Image (spheres, helix red, strand yellow):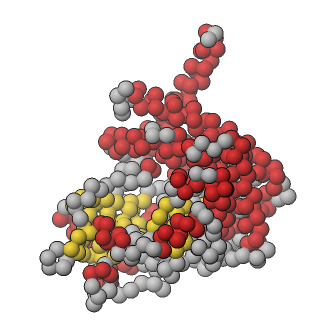
Amino acid sequence: MDQQLERVLTTKNKLRKQTLSTILEQFDGHLMNLSQSSRKKKYDKMRQDTYSFFRGSAYLFFYDVINYPFTFHTPEDKPTWIMGDMHFDNFSAFQNESHDIVFDVDDFDEGYLGSYLYDVLRMVVSIRLFANQGEFTKEEQDEFVNQYLKTYIKQLNAFKDGEADPLSLQFTVENTKKPIKKVLKKLEKRKSSHELDKQTVIDHDSIRSFDIGKEKLSSVSKQERDQISSAWKDYIASLDPDSKREDAFYQIKDIVKKKGSGIGSTGLQRYYILIEGEAEKSNYDDIILEAKEARTPIPAYFFPYDEQFWSDNKHQGRRVIHTQRAMHHRADPYLGYFSLNGRDFYVRERSPFSKDLKEKDVNDYKSMKRAVKTMAKISAKIHSRADADLEEGILNYHSENAILDAIGTKNKLFRHQLSLWSDHYQDIVERDYKLFKEWLYEQEFFKS
């Protein structure tokens, strides 16, 4: 290689690697305050493949994308309540409050107010990365992105025209096709005791407790148990009054620490809490709840400050459950929050009815295309729900109208621009992934 060209490429890579290093140090090292051990665990997951790297580096995505002058942003005074980390793996099948098995979004940790476009941009890049792992061609990836964007706009228009209602729309076996319908049907066959059987044991006195022998469960100290028990009254007080039961229903029977987590959640404290449920019945009505630490959402570091949103959501656990309630029809009745040792937590049920869409479920063109179209409808639904349609909402306008106004009559240009950009950014992610792996060895997180 020509020496001058080599210097150019070396300098370009060096500058990008310095950017990558600065962001990783600032967010994981200083803001998240992850220990060296936790960072190593997180980075070990991220180095597995390009898509895992993308999932674990949302802060790098927002650092980059905030500076692109896209045509189709909504104005700052018309933000949308967004997921903040929308990607292919943040959709799954589960049971809602009415015991319906549904397919929907399942991660609200980064929920925030901002342009809808950031959710859509992150989603279309993730579609490409996920499809690339499945060895779909470049042309097929283009079509998946096009179908997602086309269906997203079509569903927004259905809401605007009153042909569908974002408040009640849900995706079940009745209105989905394979592969999602197949996942939902499998979940319908699961026993209600599935999670209890998996995570707990019953002693000779018929007392149920967590199975500490499980690899990802560990005991808590007496001090931790006492602290959580003391904070539990705040959790009970935070429950939705329309679905809240008597206090005895939430009586704590056992607590364990949950080890291991998703890529972006590494280093956050998590507990499984076993509660009484219906006391007069057998111990098969015990319920497993998950308490997970919530931090400031990543978009907050990059988006305009919204006074009303922050005053409404000072407690990060409340922000997370507020987001979930806003985006889900008949949300988890166990959603609540509390604080512990200066950290905010949110609580949700560890449902026995939960199942992800696996790569093997979408390993052909037809299945993948159907999946992204359903995900597009869900994306439009969550963006259209959390607005003036909700009594407890903080937006006084309809988000679908604001989004469609931003797109205007330029549907084809919208799809073309986002398809081109997502293809371009996929290349950036792939280059960053290589630089990331080099950086890991340079910083001695791992040895070559």
Above or below — where is 71 with respect to 281?
above
Q: Is residue 175 left or right of residue 110?
A: right
Q: Give percent across and percent down for residue 391.
A: 61, 79
**Farthest residue in the left direction?**
204
Q: Nearer the viewer, residue 306 or 35?
A: 35
Quadrant of the image containing the C terminus: top left
Q: Residue at x 30, y 85 (%)?
A: 248
Above or below — where is 258 with respect to 65?
below
Q: Quadrant of residue 116?
A: bottom right
Q: Quadrant of residue 367?
A: bottom right
Q: Residue at x 37, y 78 (%)?
A: 236
Above or below — where is 173 with respect to 92?
below
Q: Is residue 145 left or right of residue 60?
A: right
Q: Is residue 51 left or right of residue 162?
A: left
**Farthest residue in the top direction?**
3
**Farthest residue in the right direction?**
409
Quadrant of the image containing the N terminus: top right
Q: Residue at x 60, y 14 (%)?
A: 6
How many dots with numbers? 0
Q: Give percent across and percent down for residue 395.
A: 65, 70
Q: Quadrant of residue 178?
A: bottom right
- Residue 330 can be seen in this image: yes
Q: Nearer the viewer, residue 252 or 99?
A: 99
Q: Give percent across and percent down for residue 331.
A: 51, 75
Q: Residue at x 67, y 46 (%)?
A: 141
Q: Give percent across and percent down for residue 211.
A: 23, 65
Q: Nearer the viewer, residue 34 or 122?
A: 122
- Residue 29 can be seen in this image: no
